[in-house]
Amino acid sequence: TTPKRVLTGITTTGIPHLGNYVGSIRPAIAAANEAIARGDGDAFFFLADFHALIKCFDPDEIHRSTRAIAATWLACGLDPQAVTFYRQSDIPEIPELAWVLNCSCAKGLMNRAHAYKAAVDINAAKEDVDPDFGITMGLFSYPVLMAADILMFNATHVPVGKDQVQHIEMARDIAGTFNFKYKPLFIQPNAVVDEDIPLLTGLDGRKMSKSYGNTIPLFGDGNPQVDPQKALKKAISQIVTNSQAPEEPKNCNECTIFEIYRAFATKEEIEELAAHYRRGIGWGEAKEILFNKINDEIAPMRQRYFELMNNPKELEEILQMGAVKARRVAQKQLDKTRRAIGI
Ligand code: TRP
């Protein structure tokens, strides 16, 4: 049997918020650390900055976001000694492999990609607009670059959100085509979708998402003038509640404060707060309890985050160490690939 190799990429747009922390950062790091402790395979985590280019054309934003995301994952406990943590654009072997894989990828396969089809559908709904209007080759061939990310390292398990499962299927397909045409060099990866991780609720009661503008910052909002702890408190104070009076008994099941609390508290603490709701709790007090709970967990990480953000040299050294480790693997795999195709 092939050893287990976990690999996942993080697109470098935006600044991580509490929903990203609960939904992907915290569980991914916990899973990696548990696997390492068990001696069960190895793990690759990378900053997918080439992927970010398909949707973000602001160089400062790309740069800022890459640093903030790297610092966040490290601050949240990703151990760069134990895993391989690198920036995609530091590994020139990846775009080279992507080209080779382009030549083993049917165009029709890409025509069926959800993200591309959604973009075409938006154009099709408009009058007198070309179906491919505004669609770049980057968007169209995104799944091939993603296949290169994965196949380069012969990853066996790729933890992703549901929206990415199709891309993993495509990587399997591309690997299969290459293996059949030349020789069996690439392992077909499996998507790992964790159904148990709940989506965090946002300030307005909908799913927490940057596109809804309802997020709670994880380590401040990126503005150095704002005290991150105050920013957290302020965001929590903006959670929408109903107009029940403090002493009224409350239903914890339809409450955003309670929903978020669930993601941070122990079973006993959750039961205790539910009892407090039934007895009657003021929204101000509930928000205070929530703030303290979240802050207790993230305050130590926040300190490390700002240390790394204020020390770009240290952050860069960590990423360069990761690049060296990743390139050792990538160069071998690319060498084999070149030989297989006759180049
Ligand atoms: N496309 C992924 C996303 O948007 C990010 C990504 C890029 C990725 N390359 C990858 C994820 C390889 C897993 C494996 O979430």
Image (cartoon, helix red, strand yellow):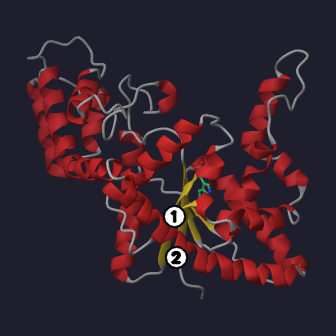
**Residue at which label 2 appears:** 325
- Which amino acid type is marked by label 2? Lys
Kindly tell me whether residue 220 is visible in this rendering: yes
- Name the side, left or right, on which 245 lies relative to 43: left
20 over 71 or under it: above or below: above
**Residue at which label 1 appears:** 86
Q: Secondary structure at mark 2?
A: helix
- Which amino acid type is marked by label 1? Tyr
**Sequence-wise first label, 2 or 1:** 1
300 over 188 or under it: above or below: above
Which one is nearer the viewer's eye here, 300 or 316? 316
What is the x, y in percent for residue 113? Answer: 77, 47
- Name the side, left or right, on which 152 lies relative to 81: right
Residue at 73% over, 43% down: 114
Q: Are marks 2 and 1 in contact (CB under 8 Å)?
A: yes
Q: Secondary structure at mark 1?
A: strand
89 over 2 or under it: above or below: above
Q: Could you classify mark 1 by the number of other residues whose Cα lies within 10 Å: few (under 14), some (14-19), or many (20 or more)?
A: many
Residue at 19% over, 42% down: 295
Residue at 20% over, 46% down: 299
Find residue 247 and report its image quarter: top left
Find residue 216 and report its image quarter: top left
What is the x, y in percent for residue 228? Answer: 25, 35
Ligand 1 contact, mark 2 (Cβ < 8 Å): no
Which one is nearer the viewer's eye here, 169 or 32? 32
User: Within the displayed image, which quadrant is ligand 1 positioned in?
Assistant: bottom right
Residue at 60% over, 74% down: 327
- Name the side, left or right, on which 151 lies relative to 23: right
What is the x, y in percent for residue 204? Answer: 38, 22
152 over 184 or under it: above or below: above
The quadrant of the image that shows the C terminus is bottom right
